[in-house]
Image (spheres, rainbow, N blue to C red):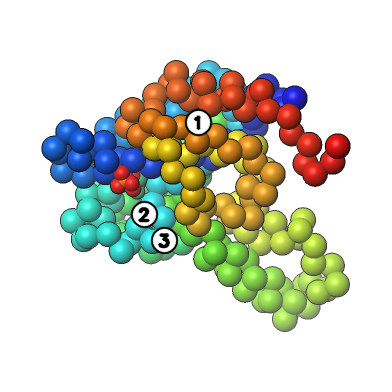
Amino acid sequence: MAQQIPRHIAVIMDGNGRWAKERGLPRREGHRAGAESVREAIEACTELKVDYLTLYAFSSENWKRPKAEVKALMTLLERFLKDKADELNEKNVRLQAIGRLNDLPKGPLTQLHKTIEATAGNTGLTLILALSYGAREEIIDGVKSILRHVRDGLLDPAMIDPDVFDKHLYTRYYPDPDLLIRTSGEMRLSNFLLWQISYAEIVIADKLWPDFRKADFHDAVAAYAARDRRFGAL
Ligand code: FPP
């Protein structure tokens, strides 16, 4: 049986657009409702004493969405980071981020750094936002970092193994996810943490992300706890 509580949970928060469409609302309203589910996911993880929660908040591919939607998401992100700083501190949550962060507009990027700084001393849950994140891009950036180290004589190519490669990824400070949750019933990985989820248990929930609340999060963790994890062994 798997350990009862996963140490690291990663989430693909899918279905905001469909949630809004079902209600005849603009897509940005779906993202706004999705931000409330983010709050509940953080609460659930705090209650369960999960150590790391990684949320796929904006993918490298999301830049291709209409300008107005990208802008709405960036505004929502900036506001979330500003408004939630006190709440994160109250809950002893430390904020971190992965992705090509310098692609973000100045406003959200500055606020991101501020909130990371303001929560740096917290020792409870580590909340990792994946922003302008793509797993293939991360792997390419990792390969480039390895090549620089080899070129500068800091790394012997014969020493390169999965543990060494891990140290060149954005996620180098965190353990691999034990559980990957995707909402809205889609069975895709969508370029999320491809290297890191090699042995993660996957739970697909049918609910759309804005409907996926604390009780659903607890249910996903219960489904994980019932799994038999063997990591390729017997
Ligand atoms: C996928 O739904 C969701 C996103 C692209 C963005 C996730 C963002 C949030 C939950 C907003 C708040 C987050 C933070 C951290 C402030 P979709 O738009 O792809 O939905 P669809 O597949 O139904 O169109």
What residue is rendered at 39% in x and 24% in y? 213
Between 215 and 184, the one lying in front of the other is 184
- CA separation in Å, label 2 and label 1: 19 Å
Q: Amino acid at mark 1?
A: Val
What secondary structure is marked by label 1?
loop
**Residue to which mark 1 is pinned:** 93
Q: Secondary structure at mark 3?
A: helix
Marked residue nearer the N-terminal end (2 or 1):
1
Instruction: From the image, state whether disc 3 or disc 1 is nearer to you.
Output: 3
Crowd around label 1: few <14 · some 14–19 · many ≥20 (10 Å) = many
On screen, residue 159 versus residue 76, left or right, reads right
Numbered disc 2: secondary structure:
helix
Residue 13 seen from this side: no
* Residue type indicated by callout 2: Leu
Q: Position of residue 165 (x, y in %)?
A: 72, 61
Return the x and y of residue 123 as percentages of the image width and height. 59, 30
Q: Residue tagged by mark 3?
A: 60
- Label 3 or label 1, whichever comes before in sequence order: 3
Q: Amino acid at mark 3?
A: Ser
Q: Residue at x 18, y 56 (%)?
A: 68
* Mark 2 and mark 3: Cα distance apart in space: 15 Å
